[in-house]
Amino acid sequence: MYVTLIGILVHIAIEVALIIRVLTRPHRDPASRVAWIAVILALPVVGMLAYVLLGETNIGRRRVERMKEVIRGMPPVAEVGLGEVANVEADVPERYRHLFRVGKSISGFDAIGGNSAKLMEDSNAAIDSMVADIDAASDHVHLLFYIWLPDCNGTKMVEALKRAAARGVTCRAMADDLGSRTMIHSVHWREMQEAGVHVARALPIGNPLLRPLHGRIDLRNHRKILVIDGRTTYCGSQNCADPEFLVKAKFAPWVDAVMRFEGPVARQNQHLFASDWMSYTNENIHSLLKTPIVAPQAGFPAQVIGTGPTVRYSAMPEMFESLFYAARHELTISTPYFVPDESMQNALCAAAWRGVETTIIFPARNDSWIVGGASRSYYADLLKAGVKIHEYAGGLLHTKSLTLDGDITLIGSANMDRRSFDLNYENNILLYDPALTDAVRARQQQYISKSNPVTSEMVDSWPLMRQLWNNTLAMLGPVL
Protein backbone atom coordinates (compact mmCIF):
# COMPACT_ATOMS: atom_id res chain seq x y z
CA MET A 1 0.00 0.00 0.00
CA TYR A 2 2.77 2.42 0.95
CA VAL A 3 4.68 1.53 -2.23
CA THR A 4 1.58 2.27 -4.31
CA LEU A 5 1.06 5.57 -2.50
CA ILE A 6 4.68 6.56 -3.03
CA GLY A 7 4.38 5.64 -6.70
CA ILE A 8 1.29 7.81 -7.10
CA LEU A 9 2.96 10.74 -5.33
CA VAL A 10 6.08 10.43 -7.48
CA HIS A 11 3.92 10.30 -10.61
CA ILE A 12 1.99 13.42 -9.52
CA ALA A 13 5.24 15.22 -8.67
CA ILE A 14 6.70 14.48 -12.11
CA GLU A 15 3.44 15.53 -13.77
CA VAL A 16 3.36 18.81 -11.83
CA ALA A 17 7.03 19.46 -12.62
CA LEU A 18 6.42 18.96 -16.33
CA ILE A 19 3.36 21.21 -16.29
CA ILE A 20 5.39 23.92 -14.53
CA ARG A 21 8.05 23.49 -17.22
CA VAL A 22 5.41 23.85 -19.94
CA LEU A 23 4.11 27.04 -18.32
CA THR A 24 7.52 28.61 -17.78
CA ARG A 25 9.38 27.54 -20.92
CA PRO A 26 10.32 30.61 -23.03
CA HIS A 27 8.81 31.25 -26.46
CA ARG A 28 5.83 28.94 -26.01
CA ASP A 29 2.59 30.39 -27.37
CA PRO A 30 -0.53 29.91 -25.20
CA ALA A 31 -2.14 27.38 -27.57
CA SER A 32 0.97 25.23 -27.40
CA ARG A 33 1.04 25.38 -23.61
CA VAL A 34 -2.63 24.37 -23.39
CA ALA A 35 -2.12 21.54 -25.89
CA TRP A 36 0.85 20.07 -24.03
CA ILE A 37 -0.84 20.31 -20.64
CA ALA A 38 -3.86 18.52 -22.11
CA VAL A 39 -1.63 15.77 -23.49
CA ILE A 40 0.21 15.33 -20.17
CA LEU A 41 -3.01 15.16 -18.16
CA ALA A 42 -5.00 13.03 -20.62
CA LEU A 43 -2.20 10.51 -21.22
CA PRO A 44 -0.40 10.42 -17.88
CA VAL A 45 2.53 8.18 -18.84
CA VAL A 46 2.59 8.47 -22.64
CA GLY A 47 1.98 12.22 -22.46
CA MET A 48 4.84 12.81 -20.05
CA LEU A 49 7.17 10.70 -22.17
CA ALA A 50 6.04 12.54 -25.32
CA TYR A 51 6.88 15.89 -23.74
CA VAL A 52 10.30 14.72 -22.60
CA LEU A 53 11.10 13.45 -26.11
CA LEU A 54 9.28 15.98 -28.30
CA GLY A 55 8.11 18.87 -26.17
CA GLU A 56 11.15 21.12 -26.40
CA THR A 57 13.27 22.43 -29.23
CA ASN A 58 16.59 21.08 -28.07
CA ILE A 59 19.51 19.96 -30.22
CA GLY A 60 21.83 19.59 -27.25
CA ARG A 61 23.72 22.15 -25.19
CA ARG A 62 27.10 21.36 -26.71
CA ARG A 63 25.80 21.67 -30.24
CA VAL A 64 24.11 24.97 -29.48
CA GLU A 65 27.31 26.37 -27.98
CA ARG A 66 29.35 25.10 -30.92
CA MET A 67 26.97 26.69 -33.45
CA LYS A 68 26.93 29.98 -31.59
CA GLU A 69 30.73 29.95 -31.38
CA VAL A 70 30.99 29.35 -35.13
CA ILE A 71 28.50 32.10 -35.97
CA ARG A 72 30.25 34.58 -33.63
CA GLY A 73 33.54 33.91 -35.42
CA MET A 74 32.18 34.25 -38.97
CA PRO A 75 33.71 37.11 -40.97
CA PRO A 76 31.28 39.72 -42.32
CA VAL A 77 30.05 39.33 -45.87
CA ALA A 78 32.55 41.01 -48.18
CA GLU A 79 31.49 43.99 -50.26
CA VAL A 80 30.64 43.70 -53.93
CA GLY A 81 33.44 44.53 -56.30
CA LEU A 82 31.41 46.90 -58.48
CA GLY A 83 30.43 50.06 -56.64
CA GLU A 84 27.37 50.73 -58.77
CA VAL A 85 25.66 47.55 -57.55
CA ALA A 86 27.09 47.45 -54.04
CA ASN A 87 24.29 49.62 -52.66
CA VAL A 88 21.11 47.89 -53.74
CA GLU A 89 18.79 49.64 -51.31
CA ALA A 90 17.86 52.14 -54.02
CA ASP A 91 17.10 49.27 -56.42
CA VAL A 92 14.28 48.03 -54.18
CA PRO A 93 11.09 50.09 -54.31
CA GLU A 94 10.25 51.79 -51.05
CA ARG A 95 7.12 49.67 -50.57
CA TYR A 96 9.24 46.50 -50.39
CA ARG A 97 12.32 47.63 -48.46
CA HIS A 98 10.85 46.65 -45.11
CA LEU A 99 10.66 43.04 -46.30
CA PHE A 100 14.40 42.89 -46.82
CA ARG A 101 14.93 44.56 -43.45
CA VAL A 102 12.96 41.72 -41.86
CA GLY A 103 15.19 39.27 -43.73
CA LYS A 104 18.34 41.03 -42.52
CA SER A 105 17.12 40.90 -38.93
CA ILE A 106 17.02 37.09 -39.24
CA SER A 107 20.29 36.18 -40.97
CA GLY A 108 22.22 39.44 -40.92
CA PHE A 109 22.48 39.57 -44.72
CA ASP A 110 21.66 42.73 -46.67
CA ALA A 111 19.76 42.61 -49.91
CA ILE A 112 22.57 42.53 -52.46
CA GLY A 113 22.43 43.36 -56.17
CA GLY A 114 24.18 42.11 -59.29
CA ASN A 115 22.34 38.79 -59.46
CA SER A 116 20.82 36.79 -62.29
CA ALA A 117 18.83 33.57 -62.04
CA LYS A 118 16.98 30.94 -64.01
CA LEU A 119 14.10 28.77 -62.89
CA MET A 120 14.91 25.14 -63.69
CA GLU A 121 12.44 23.34 -65.95
CA ASP A 122 11.91 20.34 -63.64
CA SER A 123 13.66 18.13 -61.09
CA ASN A 124 15.76 16.16 -63.56
CA ALA A 125 16.81 19.33 -65.38
CA ALA A 126 17.86 20.85 -62.05
CA ILE A 127 20.10 17.88 -61.22
CA ASP A 128 21.59 17.87 -64.72
CA SER A 129 22.35 21.59 -64.40
CA MET A 130 23.96 21.04 -61.00
CA VAL A 131 26.10 18.23 -62.39
CA ALA A 132 27.18 20.39 -65.34
CA ASP A 133 28.22 23.20 -62.98
CA ILE A 134 30.14 20.76 -60.78
CA ASP A 135 31.90 19.41 -63.89
CA ALA A 136 32.88 22.99 -64.76
CA ALA A 137 34.05 23.88 -61.22
CA SER A 138 37.65 25.07 -60.92
CA ASP A 139 38.14 25.69 -57.19
CA HIS A 140 35.48 24.27 -54.87
CA VAL A 141 32.04 22.71 -54.61
CA HIS A 142 29.88 22.91 -51.47
CA LEU A 143 26.77 20.76 -51.19
CA LEU A 144 24.18 20.27 -48.46
CA PHE A 145 20.96 18.26 -48.74
CA TYR A 146 18.35 17.08 -46.27
CA ILE A 147 17.52 13.97 -48.33
CA TRP A 148 20.14 12.47 -50.62
CA LEU A 149 19.12 9.12 -52.05
CA PRO A 150 21.32 6.54 -53.79
CA ASP A 151 19.05 6.56 -56.86
CA CYS A 152 19.72 7.77 -60.41
CA ASN A 153 19.93 11.50 -59.63
CA GLY A 154 21.61 10.87 -56.30
CA THR A 155 24.40 8.80 -57.85
CA LYS A 156 24.78 11.35 -60.67
CA MET A 157 25.73 13.84 -57.96
CA VAL A 158 28.09 11.33 -56.34
CA GLU A 159 29.92 10.71 -59.62
CA ALA A 160 30.14 14.45 -60.39
CA LEU A 161 31.75 15.11 -57.00
CA LYS A 162 34.20 12.25 -57.49
CA ARG A 163 35.18 13.60 -60.92
CA ALA A 164 35.65 17.09 -59.51
CA ALA A 165 37.78 15.84 -56.61
CA ALA A 166 39.91 13.79 -59.03
CA ARG A 167 40.89 16.93 -60.95
CA GLY A 168 41.83 18.83 -57.79
CA VAL A 169 38.61 20.69 -56.97
CA THR A 170 37.92 20.84 -53.23
CA CYS A 171 34.54 19.19 -52.66
CA ARG A 172 32.67 19.40 -49.37
CA ALA A 173 29.42 17.44 -49.12
CA MET A 174 27.11 17.41 -46.12
CA ALA A 175 23.84 15.54 -45.64
CA ASP A 176 21.35 15.30 -42.81
CA ASP A 177 22.04 12.17 -40.78
CA LEU A 178 18.38 11.12 -40.68
CA GLY A 179 17.03 12.27 -44.04
CA SER A 180 20.05 10.93 -45.97
CA ARG A 181 20.72 7.82 -43.89
CA THR A 182 20.47 5.45 -46.88
CA MET A 183 23.15 7.42 -48.77
CA ILE A 184 25.37 7.85 -45.71
CA HIS A 185 25.31 4.12 -45.01
CA SER A 186 25.78 3.15 -48.66
CA VAL A 187 28.91 2.26 -50.59
CA HIS A 188 28.65 5.60 -52.42
CA TRP A 189 29.44 7.59 -49.27
CA ARG A 190 32.60 5.54 -48.69
CA GLU A 191 33.60 5.84 -52.34
CA MET A 192 33.31 9.63 -52.18
CA GLN A 193 35.61 9.71 -49.18
CA GLU A 194 38.11 7.46 -50.95
CA ALA A 195 37.96 9.75 -53.99
CA GLY A 196 38.89 12.77 -51.86
CA VAL A 197 35.47 14.31 -51.28
CA HIS A 198 35.20 15.78 -47.77
CA VAL A 199 31.95 14.53 -46.23
CA ALA A 200 30.07 15.39 -43.05
CA ARG A 201 26.80 14.45 -41.38
CA ALA A 202 24.49 17.19 -40.14
CA LEU A 203 22.91 16.58 -36.72
CA PRO A 204 24.35 13.07 -36.29
CA ILE A 205 22.00 10.73 -34.47
CA GLY A 206 24.46 8.38 -32.79
CA ASN A 207 22.83 5.81 -30.57
CA PRO A 208 19.06 6.22 -31.09
CA LEU A 209 18.35 5.04 -27.53
CA LEU A 210 20.68 7.64 -26.02
CA ARG A 211 19.89 10.39 -28.53
CA PRO A 212 17.00 11.89 -26.47
CA LEU A 213 19.53 12.69 -23.75
CA HIS A 214 21.35 14.96 -26.20
CA GLY A 215 18.43 16.64 -27.94
CA ARG A 216 15.46 15.81 -30.15
CA ILE A 217 16.05 13.17 -32.80
CA ASP A 218 13.43 14.71 -35.12
CA LEU A 219 15.07 18.15 -35.22
CA ARG A 220 16.76 18.17 -38.62
CA ASN A 221 18.79 20.17 -41.12
CA HIS A 222 16.24 20.61 -43.91
CA ARG A 223 18.40 22.89 -46.08
CA LYS A 224 19.21 22.37 -49.75
CA ILE A 225 22.33 24.30 -50.78
CA LEU A 226 24.82 23.98 -53.63
CA VAL A 227 27.58 26.55 -54.16
CA ILE A 228 30.14 26.30 -56.99
CA ASP A 229 33.32 28.40 -56.91
CA GLY A 230 31.54 30.97 -54.73
CA ARG A 231 29.78 32.43 -57.79
CA THR A 232 26.94 30.06 -58.59
CA THR A 233 24.33 28.70 -56.21
CA TYR A 234 21.04 26.84 -56.24
CA CYS A 235 18.02 27.30 -54.01
CA GLY A 236 14.65 25.57 -53.94
CA SER A 237 12.60 22.74 -52.56
CA GLN A 238 14.29 19.81 -54.25
CA ASN A 239 16.25 17.12 -52.46
CA CYS A 240 18.98 15.18 -54.24
CA ALA A 241 16.76 12.41 -55.57
CA ASP A 242 14.68 11.27 -58.51
CA PRO A 243 11.19 12.76 -58.82
CA GLU A 244 9.91 9.18 -58.48
CA PHE A 245 11.19 9.38 -54.87
CA LEU A 246 11.26 5.63 -54.30
CA VAL A 247 11.12 5.88 -50.50
CA LYS A 248 7.56 7.22 -50.89
CA ALA A 249 6.79 6.08 -54.42
CA LYS A 250 3.00 5.97 -54.03
CA PHE A 251 2.90 9.78 -53.80
CA ALA A 252 5.21 10.34 -56.79
CA PRO A 253 6.18 12.23 -58.73
CA TRP A 254 7.60 14.79 -56.33
CA VAL A 255 7.10 18.17 -58.00
CA ASP A 256 9.74 20.75 -57.05
CA ALA A 257 11.04 24.13 -58.12
CA VAL A 258 14.71 25.13 -58.07
CA MET A 259 16.50 28.31 -59.17
CA ARG A 260 20.08 28.62 -60.37
CA PHE A 261 21.61 31.93 -59.24
CA GLU A 262 24.76 33.69 -60.37
CA GLY A 263 26.12 36.71 -58.55
CA PRO A 264 26.81 38.03 -55.06
CA VAL A 265 23.89 36.21 -53.42
CA ALA A 266 25.96 33.03 -53.84
CA ARG A 267 28.31 34.38 -51.15
CA GLN A 268 25.44 34.58 -48.69
CA ASN A 269 24.57 30.94 -49.38
CA GLN A 270 28.28 30.23 -48.93
CA HIS A 271 28.11 31.78 -45.46
CA LEU A 272 25.13 29.63 -44.59
CA PHE A 273 26.87 26.47 -45.77
CA ALA A 274 30.07 27.44 -43.95
CA SER A 275 28.24 27.94 -40.66
CA ASP A 276 26.80 24.43 -40.94
CA TRP A 277 30.04 22.86 -42.13
CA MET A 278 32.20 24.34 -39.39
CA SER A 279 29.64 23.40 -36.75
CA TYR A 280 30.14 19.70 -37.51
CA THR A 281 33.78 19.56 -38.64
CA ASN A 282 37.01 21.02 -37.32
CA GLU A 283 37.82 22.67 -40.65
CA ASN A 284 37.96 26.47 -40.76
CA ILE A 285 36.95 27.79 -44.19
CA HIS A 286 36.88 31.50 -43.36
CA SER A 287 39.37 32.23 -46.17
CA LEU A 288 36.66 31.47 -48.74
CA LEU A 289 34.43 34.13 -47.18
CA LYS A 290 36.95 36.99 -47.16
CA THR A 291 37.74 37.42 -50.85
CA PRO A 292 36.00 40.32 -52.64
CA ILE A 293 32.69 39.41 -54.23
CA VAL A 294 32.62 39.70 -58.00
CA ALA A 295 29.49 41.11 -59.60
CA PRO A 296 30.13 40.87 -63.36
CA GLN A 297 27.06 42.91 -64.20
CA ALA A 298 24.22 44.80 -62.62
CA GLY A 299 21.31 42.59 -61.67
CA PHE A 300 18.39 42.18 -59.32
CA PRO A 301 18.64 42.39 -55.51
CA ALA A 302 18.33 39.18 -53.52
CA GLN A 303 18.85 38.03 -49.95
CA VAL A 304 19.45 34.67 -48.29
CA ILE A 305 17.27 33.94 -45.26
CA GLY A 306 18.45 31.08 -43.08
CA THR A 307 16.33 29.99 -40.12
CA GLY A 308 16.47 27.27 -37.49
CA PRO A 309 16.02 26.43 -33.82
CA THR A 310 19.16 28.37 -32.86
CA VAL A 311 18.05 31.44 -34.84
CA ARG A 312 15.59 34.01 -33.53
CA TYR A 313 12.35 32.46 -32.33
CA SER A 314 9.45 32.78 -34.81
CA ALA A 315 11.76 34.13 -37.54
CA MET A 316 10.19 32.21 -40.43
CA PRO A 317 6.57 32.98 -39.48
CA GLU A 318 7.52 36.66 -39.20
CA MET A 319 8.94 36.58 -42.72
CA PHE A 320 5.86 34.89 -44.14
CA GLU A 321 3.47 37.21 -42.35
CA SER A 322 5.40 40.31 -43.43
CA LEU A 323 4.97 39.18 -47.03
CA PHE A 324 1.26 38.51 -46.54
CA TYR A 325 0.65 41.96 -45.09
CA ALA A 326 2.71 43.61 -47.84
CA ALA A 327 0.48 42.24 -50.61
CA ARG A 328 -1.68 44.81 -52.37
CA HIS A 329 -2.92 43.03 -55.50
CA GLU A 330 -1.89 39.39 -55.72
CA LEU A 331 -0.47 36.74 -53.41
CA THR A 332 0.14 33.21 -54.69
CA ILE A 333 1.57 30.43 -52.54
CA SER A 334 2.45 26.78 -53.03
CA THR A 335 3.33 24.64 -50.04
CA PRO A 336 3.03 20.92 -49.30
CA TYR A 337 2.74 21.25 -45.52
CA PHE A 338 0.42 23.83 -44.00
CA VAL A 339 -0.11 23.96 -40.24
CA PRO A 340 -0.07 27.70 -39.51
CA ASP A 341 -0.16 29.37 -36.15
CA GLU A 342 -3.06 31.72 -35.44
CA SER A 343 -1.26 34.89 -36.50
CA MET A 344 -0.27 33.41 -39.87
CA GLN A 345 -3.79 32.16 -40.56
CA ASN A 346 -5.13 35.61 -39.68
CA ALA A 347 -2.58 37.29 -41.94
CA LEU A 348 -3.61 35.14 -44.89
CA CYS A 349 -7.30 35.80 -44.29
CA ALA A 350 -6.61 39.53 -43.87
CA ALA A 351 -4.95 39.64 -47.29
CA ALA A 352 -8.04 38.17 -48.93
CA TRP A 353 -10.46 40.30 -46.88
CA ARG A 354 -8.79 43.51 -48.09
CA GLY A 355 -9.19 42.50 -51.73
CA VAL A 356 -5.85 40.86 -52.51
CA GLU A 357 -6.26 37.95 -54.95
CA THR A 358 -4.94 35.30 -52.61
CA THR A 359 -4.32 31.77 -53.87
CA ILE A 360 -2.83 28.72 -52.16
CA ILE A 361 -1.91 25.47 -53.91
CA PHE A 362 -1.65 22.30 -51.82
CA PRO A 363 -1.03 18.68 -52.86
CA ALA A 364 -4.25 16.68 -53.19
CA ARG A 365 -2.50 13.69 -51.58
CA ASN A 366 -0.08 14.42 -48.78
CA ASP A 367 2.63 12.00 -47.69
CA SER A 368 1.88 13.05 -44.10
CA TRP A 369 -1.73 12.12 -43.29
CA ILE A 370 -1.49 14.09 -40.05
CA VAL A 371 -0.44 17.30 -41.76
CA GLY A 372 -2.86 16.71 -44.64
CA GLY A 373 -5.80 16.41 -42.26
CA ALA A 374 -4.69 19.33 -40.11
CA SER A 375 -4.24 21.52 -43.22
CA ARG A 376 -7.83 20.93 -44.35
CA SER A 377 -9.16 22.08 -40.99
CA TYR A 378 -8.12 25.61 -42.02
CA TYR A 379 -9.91 25.54 -45.38
CA ALA A 380 -13.29 26.83 -44.20
CA ASP A 381 -11.95 30.08 -42.71
CA LEU A 382 -9.63 30.67 -45.66
CA LEU A 383 -12.44 30.18 -48.17
CA LYS A 384 -14.79 32.38 -46.18
CA ALA A 385 -12.24 35.21 -46.36
CA GLY A 386 -11.96 34.78 -50.14
CA VAL A 387 -8.75 32.75 -50.41
CA LYS A 388 -8.73 30.52 -53.48
CA ILE A 389 -7.61 26.97 -52.67
CA HIS A 390 -6.40 24.47 -55.24
CA GLU A 391 -5.30 20.87 -54.67
CA TYR A 392 -2.64 19.67 -57.10
CA ALA A 393 -3.45 16.26 -58.58
CA GLY A 394 -0.30 15.57 -60.62
CA GLY A 395 1.81 14.12 -57.84
CA LEU A 396 3.06 15.47 -54.54
CA LEU A 397 3.47 19.21 -55.01
CA HIS A 398 6.60 19.80 -52.93
CA THR A 399 7.40 23.31 -54.20
CA LYS A 400 7.64 26.02 -51.55
CA SER A 401 7.06 29.26 -53.44
CA LEU A 402 5.50 32.66 -52.84
CA THR A 403 4.98 35.46 -55.34
CA LEU A 404 3.82 38.92 -54.34
CA ASP A 405 2.23 41.55 -56.61
CA GLY A 406 4.19 40.27 -59.62
CA ASP A 407 7.43 41.70 -58.18
CA ILE A 408 8.66 39.69 -55.19
CA THR A 409 9.52 35.99 -54.96
CA LEU A 410 10.41 33.84 -51.98
CA ILE A 411 11.72 30.36 -52.81
CA GLY A 412 13.48 27.75 -50.73
CA SER A 413 13.08 24.89 -48.30
CA ALA A 414 10.72 26.29 -45.64
CA ASN A 415 7.20 24.93 -45.36
CA MET A 416 4.32 26.73 -43.65
CA ASP A 417 4.16 24.35 -40.71
CA ARG A 418 5.43 24.09 -37.15
CA ARG A 419 8.43 21.97 -38.13
CA SER A 420 9.81 24.69 -40.41
CA PHE A 421 8.94 27.36 -37.84
CA ASP A 422 10.45 25.75 -34.75
CA LEU A 423 12.40 22.58 -35.49
CA ASN A 424 14.18 22.50 -38.84
CA TYR A 425 17.09 24.45 -40.27
CA GLU A 426 15.85 26.05 -43.50
CA ASN A 427 17.21 28.23 -46.30
CA ASN A 428 15.30 30.57 -48.60
CA ILE A 429 16.07 33.38 -51.02
CA LEU A 430 13.97 36.55 -51.17
CA LEU A 431 14.31 38.55 -54.39
CA TYR A 432 12.87 41.53 -56.20
CA ASP A 433 12.69 41.03 -59.96
CA PRO A 434 9.45 41.31 -61.95
CA ALA A 435 10.76 39.20 -64.85
CA LEU A 436 11.88 36.29 -62.68
CA THR A 437 8.76 36.57 -60.55
CA ASP A 438 6.73 36.32 -63.74
CA ALA A 439 8.46 32.99 -64.50
CA VAL A 440 7.60 31.71 -61.02
CA ARG A 441 3.99 32.90 -61.42
CA ALA A 442 3.82 30.99 -64.71
CA ARG A 443 5.03 27.85 -62.92
CA GLN A 444 2.43 28.38 -60.22
CA GLN A 445 -0.23 28.69 -62.92
CA GLN A 446 0.94 25.36 -64.34
CA TYR A 447 0.31 23.86 -60.91
CA ILE A 448 -3.15 25.43 -60.79
CA SER A 449 -3.98 24.04 -64.24
CA LYS A 450 -3.34 20.54 -62.88
CA SER A 451 -5.26 21.17 -59.67
CA ASN A 452 -8.83 20.79 -58.48
CA PRO A 453 -10.42 23.92 -56.98
CA VAL A 454 -11.80 23.60 -53.46
CA THR A 455 -15.04 25.42 -52.73
CA SER A 456 -16.92 26.32 -49.56
CA GLU A 457 -19.75 24.04 -50.67
CA MET A 458 -17.34 21.09 -50.88
CA VAL A 459 -15.94 21.75 -47.42
CA ASP A 460 -19.42 22.22 -45.92
CA SER A 461 -20.47 18.87 -47.37
CA TRP A 462 -17.66 16.93 -45.71
CA PRO A 463 -19.08 14.26 -43.35
CA LEU A 464 -19.15 15.15 -39.68
CA MET A 465 -16.58 12.49 -38.85
CA ARG A 466 -14.14 13.95 -41.38
CA GLN A 467 -14.56 17.43 -39.95
CA LEU A 468 -14.04 16.10 -36.42
CA TRP A 469 -10.94 14.21 -37.56
CA ASN A 470 -9.39 17.23 -39.32
CA ASN A 471 -10.12 19.56 -36.41
CA THR A 472 -8.75 17.08 -33.90
CA LEU A 473 -5.51 16.85 -35.86
CA ALA A 474 -5.38 20.66 -36.04
CA MET A 475 -5.70 20.83 -32.25
CA LEU A 476 -2.48 18.84 -32.12
CA GLY A 477 -0.80 21.43 -34.36
CA PRO A 478 1.07 23.05 -31.47
CA VAL A 479 2.59 19.70 -30.49
CA LEU A 480 3.29 18.35 -34.01
Image (tube, grey):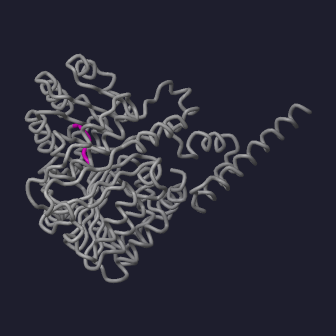
Task: Please state which of residues 196 and 391 is positioned toward the viewer in this rendering.
Answer: 196
**Dominant SS type (magenta):** loop
Residue 338 in the image: x percent, y percent?
39, 58
The residue sitting at the top extreme is 194
Task: Please state which of residues 269 and 436 is positioned toward the viewer in this rendering.
Answer: 269
Looking at the image, residue 331 lies above or below residue 317? below
Q: Give left or right: position of 366 versus 20.
A: left
Task: Please state which of residues 154 and 140 is positioned toward the viewer in this rendering.
Answer: 140
Residue 238 lies within the magenta run:
yes
Residue 194 lies within the magenta run:
no
Q: Which residue is rendered at x = 29% and y = 64% of the image? A: 333
Determine if residue 322 is in view. yes
Residue 273 in the image: x percent, y percent?
30, 41
Looking at the image, residue 5 lies above or below residue 299? above
Total number of numbered discs in the rendering: 0
Task: Find residue 383 and report its image quarter.
Answer: bottom left
Determine if residue 446 is in view. no
Q: Give left or right: position of 275 versus 15.
A: left
Residue 24 in the image: x percent, y percent?
67, 54
The residue sitting at the bottom extreme is 354
Residue 375 in the image: x percent, y percent?
41, 59
The residue sitting at the right extreme is 2
Task: Please state which of residues 388 and 62 is positioned toward the viewer in this rendering.
Answer: 62
**Which image quarter is the N terminus in?**
top right
In magenta, the rendered stretch is 237-241
